[in-house]
Image: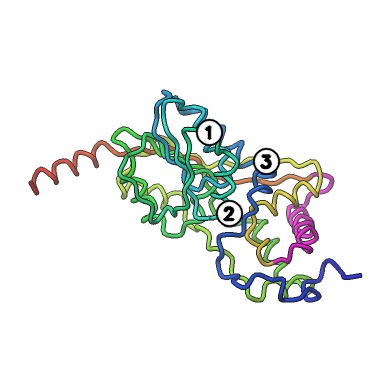
Amino acid sequence: MIDSRRCDLISKATMPENLYRNINFWDPKLYLEKATPQFQLAALALKKYKFKGNEQILDIGCGPGNITAKLAQKVPQGKVIGIDPAKNMIAFAKDTYSKVKNVSFEDKNVLNFSYSQKFDLITSFSALHWVINQEAALARIYNHLAKHGMLMVVMIPQRKVEPMHDALISLERSEVWQSCFEKFIPPRYLAVSQESYQELLNKIGFQIDYFEAKETLVPFESIDDMAKWFESWSSHRLAVPAQLRRGFFYALSEEYLFLTQQRGTFDYNYATWEFVARISPHHRLFHYLSNKIRA
C-alpha cells in the first residue's frame, strides 16, 4: 500500500508540467463549497452600499461567480460583468449562472481589461492581493469608474507575523513533503503597508471613504473542515498530486494549530483590508482644467 503522505513515491508524470506561478490552480466547485468566510466578508461589505437597481457593475476576480450573480440580483435594471484570469473559474461561472440574464463572465486580467463603458460600482473581493503591480491595476480601475462611481474592495494584506505562511514553509521543507515543491514557485503575494497602499490610492486619484484593517476569527467544527478550506484557496494544491492533497492539507492544519497554540479549537485568524474609494473631486477638476488648457 502506498504511503499517502510521501510525494516521492508518486510518479512525476502525475505532476503538472508548469509549476511556475500558475494561476489555474483553482477548483471552482471546491472554492464555491468551502470559501464561506470570503463570501461572508463580501456580503458584509456590500450591505454598506445602497443599490438603486440600475447600476453598471464590474466584479474583478469574480472566481466561481456566486457573488457576481448576487450583485446581478441587486440590479435588475442594470448589468454586471465578472472578470477573472483563471479560465476554469470563468468556464464554471458561465455554466452555473447561464440563466441569469443581466450577468456575463469574461476571461480577463485586471492589468489589461478594457471596456468602452464606465461603471457605477467596481468590486473586488478576496482577489486583488494576488496582483503585484497594484499601481497599474488601480489606474485601470480608476479609468473605468464613472464620475460618481465607487470602488469597493476586500483584500488580504501580508502581516509581519503570519502563522499560515510559517506553516506552509515548514511543510515545504519537511522530509515528507519537500519533493512536491522542488519546482514549485507560488504566485507572488502583495506585501505593502496599509499607509503605503492608501498613499497609492491617493496618488492614482482616489478619495478614500473608509479603509479598515480587520481581523476576523473564523471557527471550524473540525480539523477536516479547516483543511478543506485551506485547500480551496491555497496555490500549494497545484504542487501536490490529487491523491495526496487530503494528507497535505490535514498536515498543514495540524502545523497551523500547533503554531497558534490551539488545543481543542480550530480557529483561523483572518486578516483583511476593506475599503471604499471614489474619484477625488480635486483630481477630477485637475483633469478637466488640464484638458481645457490643452484644447
Q: Disc 3 vs disc 1: which is toward the camera?
A: 1
Numbered range of the magenta stretch: 240-265
**Crowding at mark 1 (Cα within 10 Å: few <14, some 14-19, many 20+):** few
Q: Which residue is mark 3?
A: 217
Q: Disc 3 vs disc 2: which is toward the camera?
A: 2
112 versus 40 height, above or below: below
At 32% across and 39% down in the image, what residue appears?
A: 118
Whole-angstrom CA distance, mark 1 to mark 2, is 19 Å
Q: Earlier in the sequence, mark 3 or mark 1?
A: 1
Give the x, y percent position of residue 7: 77, 72
Q: Which residue is mark 1?
A: 100
**Crowding at mark 2 (Cα within 10 Å: few <14, some 14-19, many 20+):** some
**Crowding at mark 3 (Cα within 10 Å: few <14, some 14-19, many 20+):** few
In the image, taking residue 212 as reference, residue 238 lies left or right, namely right
130 versus 52 height, above or below: below
Tell me the quadrant of the picture where the N terminus can be found. bottom right
Q: Earlier in the sequence, mark 3 or mark 2?
A: 2
Q: Which residue is mark 2?
A: 88
Whole-angstrom CA distance, mark 3 to mark 2, is 30 Å
